[in-house]
Image (tube, coloured by chain):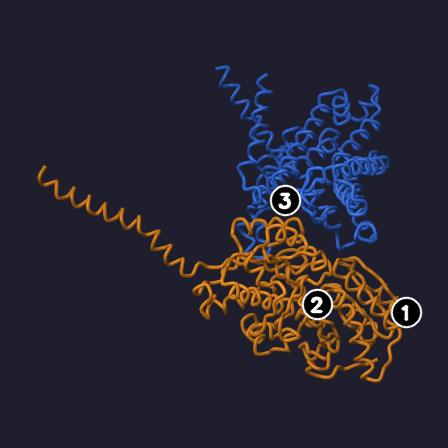
Chain colours: A blue, B orange
Amino acid sequence: MKRWLALAVLIAVAAVLPLLLSPTGYWIRVLTFTLLFAAMAQAWNLIGGLANQTSLGHAAFFGIGAYTSTILLLKFGISPWLGMFAAGALGGLAALVIAIPTLRLQGHYFALATLAFGEVMRVIANVWAPLTGGPGGLSVPFTPPSFAGYSFKQLLPHAYIALGALIIVTGIFEVIRRGAMGYRLRAIRENQAAAEVIGIDTTKVKLQTAVISGVLMAMLGTLYAQVAVFFDPDTVFSAAAISIRVALIAILGGVGTAAGPILGALFIIPVEELMNDLFSAGAAGLSQLIFGAILIAVILWKPRGFITLWDALRARFARGETR
Amino acid sequence: MSKMLPRAGLSRRSLLAGTASLLASPMIGNAARAEAKPVNIGVIMPLSGANAQFGINSRNGIELVADEINAAGGIKALGGAKINLIVADSTSTPTTAGTVAQRLISQNEVTGILGAFASSLTIAISEVTERRDIPLLTMSFADQITGRGFKNIFQVVAKASALGKAQLDYTLAIAQAAGTKIDKIAIMYEDTAYGTAQANGLRAAAKAANVEVAMDDAYPLGITDTTPLINKLRASGAQAVFPVSYLNDSLLIIRTMRQQRITMPAIGGAAGYVIPDFEKGLGEFAEGVLSIAPANYDLAPDLTERFRKRFGYFMVHEALEHAVALDVLVQAIEKAKSAKAEDVAAALRGAKFTGGWTRAMTGGAVQFDSTGLNVLSVPVMVQWRNKELVTVWPKDVAKATAEWKS
């Protein structure tokens, strides 16, 4: 009961926050990207957290999503709302294709295989110029503002769409985690051989999770394209800016938990922005250096993620109550 | 008690005086600032990552002009207002560049933005500035920049397709002047936005001039071994090679060529071929290498030597063009007599700017058409001669005759 109340309060706060920021300003853009990255990290958390398969290639699905909806919009005038579902379908298909050979791999080998897949997609987008615009990238056309056309003059609607996406993806994550699938995934994570012995079709369960994760990631790619308005292969298929960053967000926040990616994104995206704001006018690359140093410090301080902070806080609170 | 009163009175008086001065101080400050409230101008450049050197060169050019204008009494139409540059790192990610632009607009209330060298970054910034009606001045080449019907973007140099065309056409003319007819060439370019756009221009020009393209190869940015490319080049039978690339690849390509004793003329596509590091990295191998460039410092040495004096190297074209961009922006502010972005953008649209740094451009001035393109800018061909870049074509601006060894 109390948990639900806390959740309701949290969502209410999140719903009011965008209204307090200037609708054409800078912080609402940062907030929108923070919410989007939280949702992306949550989608990653399905396969990376629940199934413990550290994917470093989620940019592949993300980029497929961004390109699918944008190409449909540019060539056929299809609204990105519909394009988003085409994006999800293709993202799921790609996840299936990549998952079949790679899910048999474990640990580092899986990570490396997915990393390579993201790179392959980047090269394809670079070369297939007639469809993707090649290295020059694609611009989402500036159509007259309308909800049906997914085009807004201000960032406020984008912030709410990103918030909605985060809530939906987190909901899906929680449903899976608490359901039968969550138990199977946990069994696989603890000991794959034992899970098979007790009758879990480990390949099938992992495959299902990978596809759901890929579908969600691709749909988020569409949302990202609509906010960023311009992207090129290096942006959406980037290993560092997308694949590794979403993994980092989930890991820093607390992998395998619903709150982890949200905490991680709330820390990483604004701090990165703040570093750029404060230091980038000085020595070249200083802001990234400081940002990197902060990340190292945080990981040394809380190797299991920010979620442990929350747990410690709650434990102290509970002790205080019982006393 | 009576002894204490004067003390209390004194303290009350000083308190009153203090309060009065406190109340008045913001007004004094306001009055002083109203005379010359500095004009914020955003500078967004890749100051980290692969293009950092180009970003730093650009920033140096802008700082030079800003300091000169401030030292000469600031912006006259605004009561001597000083230029206040807000420099920010775009990194190499377009989305970050867009976010940085959003920050400069809403937090620093910039009058205009200059940036961001790489076309993809400039395009991402322009998506933000267009929606907020902030003028963006750039020296990025990509054709899309002024090809989208935007009202608030101003491109001070010729487009990539025009550069690619000039790279070929000028070469044919130079060869002809030396008594050689070229009918077979090779193109190699990195698969970035800049490389592919310029290669398209080269290819189209070759077709128009009936020149056979014997080799047409894209390679990934950051290539580590160019030997296969050079072997292919040797086998192609081309009379001249047109490499389009940033710095590291340009060094590898020319070094591998010269080490294999391939002496065919190489005509670079600006970027890596026209910066001091090219000569530093190649030494004597750099001598005689040609390159297309959107502008060159030897066309206005009285202006560009000031850059060399301050920074210790010649004024590379990105520094020069960004200097011109700032000069044009300031001229527009003078003309508009306002630091409001919309007023300045209106003063820029379709206008012609002369004098100052615009003299350093080919055409001797800057004139924007309705798309925001500077129609007066014509690319030049430069050649490495004794550690300097010398303009060798077109004939009317050339400082020396091109050396052509076929």
Q: Residues within 10 Å of mark 3 (few under 14, many from 20)?
A: some
Q: Residues within 10 Å of mark 2 (few under 14, many from 20)?
A: many
Q: Nearer the viewer, residue B106 or B119?
A: B106
Which residue is found at the position 72% from the left and 42% from the top? A243
User: Which callout, 3 or 1, points to the residue nearer the camera?
Assistant: 3
- Which residue position holds label 3? A153
User: Which callout, 2 or 3, points to the residue nearer the camera?
Assistant: 3
User: Which callout, 1 or 2, points to the residue nearer the camera?
Assistant: 2
At mark 3, the secondary structure is loop
What is the chain letter for disc 1? Answer: B
Q: Quadrant of residue A314?
A: top right
Q: Are marks 2 and 3 on the same chain?
A: no
- Which residue position holds label 1? B236
Q: Quadrant of residue A116?
A: top right
* Residue B370 horizontal/vertical position (percent): 67, 62
Q: Measure the C-alpha gap from mark 2 to mark 3.
A: 31 Å
* Residue A42 horizontal/vertical position (percent): 69, 33
The reply, left or right, for residue A66 in relation to residue A201 is left
- Amino acid found under the numbered disc labelled 2: Ala
Quadrant for the N terminus of chain A, please: top right
Q: Nearer the viewer, residue B181 or B26?
A: B26
For residue A282, say whether it is visible: no
Q: Which of the numbered marks, if any, corresponds to residue B158? A: 2
Q: Nearer the viewer, residue B378 or B350?
A: B350
At mark 2, the secondary structure is loop
- Amino acid found under the numbered disc labelled 1: Ser
For residue B211, say whether it is visible: yes
Q: Measure the C-alpha gap from mark 1 to mark 2.
A: 31 Å
- Amino acid found under the numbered disc labelled 3: Lys
